[in-house]
Image: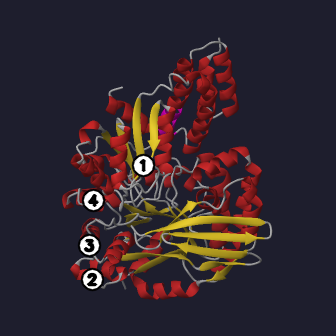
Amino acid sequence: MALTPKQQILAAARGQKLDKLPFGARIDVWYNYHSAHGTLPDKYKGWSQVDILRDQGAGVEVRFFAVTREEYRDMEVVETNDPPYITTEYRTPVGTVAKKEVFDTSEGPWIKYEMEKLFKSEKDYPVIKYVMEHTGAVANFEPYYKLREEVGEDGMVMTAAGGLWSPVQRVMREIIGYEQFFYELADRPARVEEMIEAVKDLERRKLRVGIECDLEIFNICANWSDDIQTPVFRKYFIPWFQEVSEFLHARGRLVMAHTDGEMRRLNRMFRETGIDIAEAITPAPQTLVSMKEFREQLGDGATIWGGIPSILFEPMYSDADFDAYIKNMFKEMAPGYRFIVGMGDNVPFDGDINRVGRVVELIDKYGRLPIQV
Amino acid sequence: MADISLLAQAIDRGDMEKAVALTRAAAASGANPKDIIAKGLQAGMASVGEKFSSGEYFLPDMLMAARALKAALEVLKPMLEKTGIPTIGRVVIGTVEGDMHDIGKNVVATFLSGNGFEVFDLGLNVPVQKFVDEVKDKKPDILGMSALLTTTMPVFSKVIKALEQGGLRSSVKVIVGGAPVTQDYANYIGADGYAHDGGRAVPECRKLLGK
């Protein structure tokens, strides 16, 4: 009996040999934008993104942020809504810290950005440490199960036990801010490391709750790119990835990272992380790395999921350009094992949704495994 | 006479204390402040840019270098009060409307200012009209726009069209960048230049100005 799309994706992720390239397509940027603006194509008005992907004949990849949520104790958390801004204050016995976020609707109504970080100055270190230490993790399995039921055997719901970021990234991007993080790391390394450890402990608590959910693949880190400095990656990221991978592998789970950025300098270190799947791989022309280089640099032990840069869906590329790119990508990935065709990392809002179906046709024609060059 | 090449090395290594000390020493020995900037500070930043583009250096290396440069420039400020810091061109830069990402834009701004450009950073989520108004007001040689999202990339075109409608397009070179942006896309929308990263933005801007 033929494998379902979900079984195909999981088989490729586990390194099993298939007879055809699996395809897990992600369209939520396109879908959320057009749903929010009422501009879905007539045929798809009122459809879910899962049904649109089914209609295109593609395997489904949809996102659900995490199977746990944070719960606070021994502090007051006050949220003030002043559209489009939301200010959250954490009032603790050792002081108060606050962040200001804004929701961005350009990719749908669910992305928020910190306009003001939690960390403002050195005095905030003990307060943020207190917040992390007094944050617990509780199960949030039901919404995930509901979405998984909707997708069924047609694909995968990708999710995480905890944060979108790995702990160091959360400190770097969300709590301190990218530039300030590196200045702080240079000037006050011990304080930064203490904060990282507090966030790690919180993520460990989330993992212990999240492992009770029977998801097959855990996403443990999003949005890798070369702006994470190699020495920082080696010192702070890799040990964490190794610890989490070991924990999850021991419990029969697969480990994934959303590696959709410029990966020129991080690729070679991927092998040291223990992570099974490099997802949303985005090659040239959108980055400086070809698919062939990705394959060589990530090694045969990793499953690559991705390969179609989102810009290829833009109208500036003709169908002929698109087809030529896909065919060449298949050749570059020959023999094609441990490869799941997917987006790097999405279909843009002005992309042609029917190109998802084109990929399905091209896989049928040229994606039989092993690919012969 | 202080060895200005050591200052370039200190900038290259992001050593703020050494950069400040060497700048003080160079100034005390009577070196021309403009030489200190060109042969010491900017030479150091140029080296950082090359190493960043070749993959040897990372963004944090550039951040540390830029911080060292900024501290060294503070030392020279009193000496440059009358003449100002020499610049090779004016750049207005910002992240387009709807986009809240600024790391890449900040990096480009830092590289450009570290390499002798006068930079006016408009921040993030910059409305189309704000770009037009700033081009009118600041009369920059270059307008730099950044977008991280495929949903916000089309704003580049809107700004270019607004510049055309305002009769300003021929007065300014437009350069674009950001994670999803490619050279093909820059050509497609009629931008004058494209840079994949901060290191490449400097030579591209120099090229646009013929310098």
Same chain for marks 4 and 2? yes
Q: Which residue is mark 4?
A: A327
Q: Residue furthest right?
A: A93
Tell me where residue A109 sits by quadrant: bottom left
Classify mark 4: helix, strand or loop: helix
Q: Amino acid at mark 2?
A: Lys
Q: Earlier in the sequence, mark 4 or mark 2?
A: 2
Q: Chain of mark 2?
A: A
Magenta stretch: give its range: B48-55
For mark 3, does the 10 Å Cα neighbourhood hold few (<14), some (14 to 19), or many (20 or more) residues?
A: some
> Which mark is nearer the camera, 2 or 3?
2
Rendered view: A108 above or below A234: below
Classify mark 1: helix, strand or loop: strand
Image position, residue A305 (x, y; %): 43, 65
**Observer-nearest of B185 and A232:** B185
Q: Which residue is mark 3?
A: A357
> Which mark is nearer the camera, 3 or 4?
3
Residue A45: image tag: 2
Quick check: marks 4 and 2 in contact, CB under 8 Å?
no
> Main structural element of the magenta stretch: helix, strand or loop?
helix
Q: Which residue is mark 1?
A: B94
User: As drawn, is A297 to the left or to the right of B72?
Assistant: left
**Which quarter of the image is occupied by the C terminus of chain B?**
top left
**Observer-nearest of B11 and A317:** B11
Q: Chain of mark 3?
A: A
Q: Earlier in the sequence, mark 3 or mark 4?
A: 4
Q: Amino acid at mark 3?
A: Gly
Q: Amino acid at mark 4?
A: Lys
Q: Chain of mark 4?
A: A
Classify mark 2: helix, strand or loop: loop
Residue A126: image tag: none
